[in-house]
């Protein structure tokens, strides 16, 4: 395999007066024809990276404009974080990534790394649109909580009153759908569906098709007797929202979330479209294979990374099979707005905000993620509250710490590395370690 050259562009904005809705400055690429982006620092980081070389690449001296007001943070991103991120990207074969960190004392720093197109070598750009996968659940969940806040449905209302034909529907509540405790089978784990997605990535699915797959399997457990991440829950919530309001889910999201927060580049497309400029998405492990592929470590992981070959370009795969659970596309700037709004319940009534953050453990492992109502708490990552996202070709992490008002957003154009790890999550861990000492 030829050595890959990674390029990093970093931009920093001054602290904003309203950290609850930070505005990210995007690093511009001279190759793009779009306008209205923030000015990029004139910093170029080039490293020739061999497949298994873990050494940190050399860092060119950046031209620092608008230095951070906190001298302890000045240069941290350029001197420490960027090289570490590039090392992780090289090790895990991540083509491109966007990383944004916001702190009240030193504003927002946005970094674009690698390429958004392996065919052309086009540099990743902070204005790129990417699929955000499961982060879509936070949009759908927020609409449901808004409807509960206006008494158009009840959190503890049986699903059977709102949707017919749901197994255990008389005993499953709206709350349990939001909290992933319904026990309903996750249709995205169905082997036949995943084989079909591999063979026909352009296939169009209706929400009813997805529920039919889910309901052909027995539930994992009785309602409220366990936790299992299930896209079926959120598809049901999307259908409930449409039935209660007599409006389409895209319309609801635009009216209730995207427009109020100024998220002009976020949308849910029940198909293959991604607005331009878009980063192409790459997949090393197919849908069916991913159901059983383990997370590798040590020599096994190193060999997997080395021998993976070229990833499959799945940019044009139809996202309709994820719909309310994963079909949204967004940008770094928009997720910078959404992360603090979600974590603080900005768009919710006080009552629903409180209900949203009644977190429960997702496992018995100490320090494991806890889950609220379409919202995750990551106690091991400096108090970040938010959500991860994964869909073929893309992975995302966004989190906000209400105590420190810190926001972290990571977007990658790969959904799973050859060793089985999730690219955006691994990059997020590097950010937490370098910036927050976690």
Image (cartoon, rainbow, N blue to C red):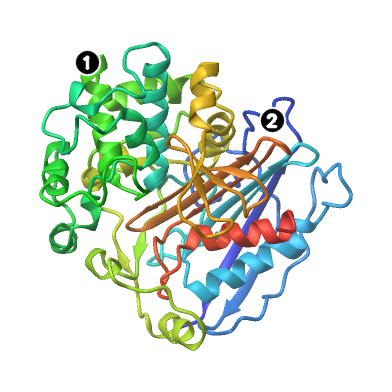
* SS for callout 1: loop
State yes or no: discs 2 and 1 in contact (Cβ < 8 Å).
no
The residue labelled by disc 1 is 246
In which image quadrant can residue 151 be found? top left
Task: Read off the residue under disc 2.
Answer: 19
The quarter of the image holding the N terminus is bottom left
Q: Which of marks 2 and 1 is in front?
A: 1
User: At 34% from the left edge and 24% from the top edge, which residue is drawn?
Assistant: 156
Q: Is residue 15 left or right of residue 386?
A: right
Question: Is residue 17 left or right of 427 when viewed as pictured?
Answer: right
Q: Which residue lies furthest to the right in this view?
A: 71
At x 26%, y 53%, the residue is 316
Q: How crowded is mark 2: few (under 14 residues within 10 Å), some or many (20 or more)?
A: some
Residue 269 place in picture, x, y as percent: 28, 37
Note whether 423 is above or below 36 in the view shown: below
Residue 8 x, y percent position in the rendering: 62, 60
Question: Measuring 69% from the left and 30% from the top, which residue is drawn there?
Answer: 19
Residue 352 shows up from this direction: yes
Q: In which quarter of the image is the C terminus?
A: bottom right
Percent coordinates x, y for residue 270 in the rendering = 24, 38
Q: From mark 2 to mark 1, how far is it between C-alphas?
A: 35 Å
Q: Residue 404's quadrant in the figure? A: top right
The location of residue 159, given as percent across then percent down, is 23, 28
Q: Is mark 2 on a helix, strand or loop?
A: loop
Residue 205 appears in the figure: no
């Amino acid at each position: 395999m030829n050595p890959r050259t990674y390029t990093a562009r970093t931009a920093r904005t001054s602290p904003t007066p309203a950290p609850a809705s930070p505005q990210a400055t995007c690093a511009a690429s001279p190759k793009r024809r779009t306008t209205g982006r923030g000015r990029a620092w004139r910093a170029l980081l080039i490293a020739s990276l061999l497949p298994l070389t873990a050494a940190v690449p050399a860092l060119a001296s950046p031209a620092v404009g608008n230095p951070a007001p906190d001298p302890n943070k000045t240069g941290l991103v350029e001197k420490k974080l960027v090289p570490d991120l590039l090392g992780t990207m090289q090790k895990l074969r991540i083509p491109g990534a966007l990383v944004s960190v916001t702190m009240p004392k030193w504003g927002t720093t946005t970094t674009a790394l690698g390429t958004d197109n392996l065919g052309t070598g086009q540099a990743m750009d902070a204005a790129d649109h990417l699929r955000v996968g499961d982060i879509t659940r936070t949009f759908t969940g927020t609409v449901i909580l808004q409807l509960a806040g206006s008494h158009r449905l009840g959190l503890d209302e049986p699903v059977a009153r709102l949707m017919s034909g749901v197994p255990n529907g008389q005993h499953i509540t709206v709350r349990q759908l939001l909290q992933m405790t319904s026990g309903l089978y996750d249709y995205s784990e169905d082997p036949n569906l995943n084989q079909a997605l591999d063979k026909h990535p352009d296939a169009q699915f209706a929400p009813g098709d997805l529920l039919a797959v889910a309901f052909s399997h027995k539930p994992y457990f009785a309602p409220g007797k366990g936790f299992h991440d299930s896209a079926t829950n959120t598809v049901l919530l999307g259908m409930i929202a449409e039935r209660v309001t007599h409006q389409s889910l895209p319309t609801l999201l635009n009216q209730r979330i995207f427009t109020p927060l100024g998220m002009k580049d976020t949308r849910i497309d029940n198909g293959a479209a991604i607005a331009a400029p878009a980063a192409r998405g790459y997949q090393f492990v197919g849908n069916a294979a991913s159901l059983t592929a383990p997370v590798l470590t040590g020599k096994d992981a190193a060999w997997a990374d080395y021998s993976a070959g070229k990833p499959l370009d799945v940019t044009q795969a139809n996202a309709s099979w994820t719909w309310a659970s994963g079909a949204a596309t967004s940008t770094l700037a928009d997720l910078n707005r959404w992360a603090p709004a979600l974590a603080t319940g900005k768009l919710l009534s006080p009552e629903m905000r409180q209900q949203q953050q009644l977190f429960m453990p997702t496992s018995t492992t100490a320090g494991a993620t806890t889950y609220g109502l379409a919202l995750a708490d990551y106690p091991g990552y400096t108090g970040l509250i938010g959500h991860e996202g994964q869909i073929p070709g893309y992975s995302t992490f966004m989190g906000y710490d209400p105590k420190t008002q810190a926001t972290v957003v990571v977007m990658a154009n790969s959904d799973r590395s050859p060793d089985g790890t999730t690219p955006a999550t691994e990059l997020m861990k590097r950010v937490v370690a370098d910036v927050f000492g976690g």
